Amino acid sequence: QVQLVESGGGLVQAGGSLRLSCAASGRSLSNAFMAWFRQASGKEREFVAAINWSAGWAAAYADSVKGRCTISRDNAKNTMYLQMDSLKPEDTAVYYCALQVQSNGAFYHTYAYDYWGQGTQVTVSS
């Protein structure tokens, strides 16, 4: 049984930082891509960042977060992170981690992922 558990969300002032974590369990991540998505109230879920798990390098960032967010992973802990700096009120959303068991190249799209976490709320006040 695959489980993805996010943590680290909260309330922060504009300009502040948060680090989100996603702990994965239940299967090997050796050929996987993992990603962060977010969903603001009343909006569709959108891509934030993706990482090639085995190589450990970031595959892509959304333009809206590029330069302010860093995706990383700790292979020994089976945990992915999203460091978010210079947060803006428009970053307010529920943040989800997602697992693509076998890389298929379509990492921008929600349909490309096999498993999802329950989400963690990030609220940025102005």
Image (cartoon, grey):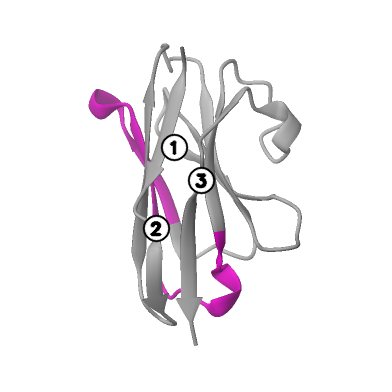
> Residue beneath label 2, please?
9
Q: Earlier in the sequence, mark 1 or mark 2?
A: 2
Nearer mark to the viewer, of 1 and 3? 3
Q: Earlier in the sequence, mark 2 or mark 3?
A: 2
Determine which quarter of the picture holds residue 74. top left
> Residue beneath label 3, please?
119
Residue 98 in the figure: left or right of residue 63: left
Depicted 89 relative to depicted 63: above or below: below
Q: What residue span does the magenta drawing correspond to? A: 70-93
The verdict on residue 72 being magenta is yes
The verdict on residue 2 being magenta is no
Q: CA distance from mark 2 to mark 3?
A: 9 Å
Q: At 43% across and 15% down in the image, what residue appears?
A: 30
Nearer mark to the viewer, of 1 and 2? 2
> Residue beneath label 1, please?
57
Residue 77 location (% of width, % of height): 25, 28
Residue 109 location (% of width, % of height): 73, 38
Q: CA distance from mark 1 to mark 2?
A: 23 Å
| Circles 1, 3 touching at the beta carbon (< 8 Å) | no
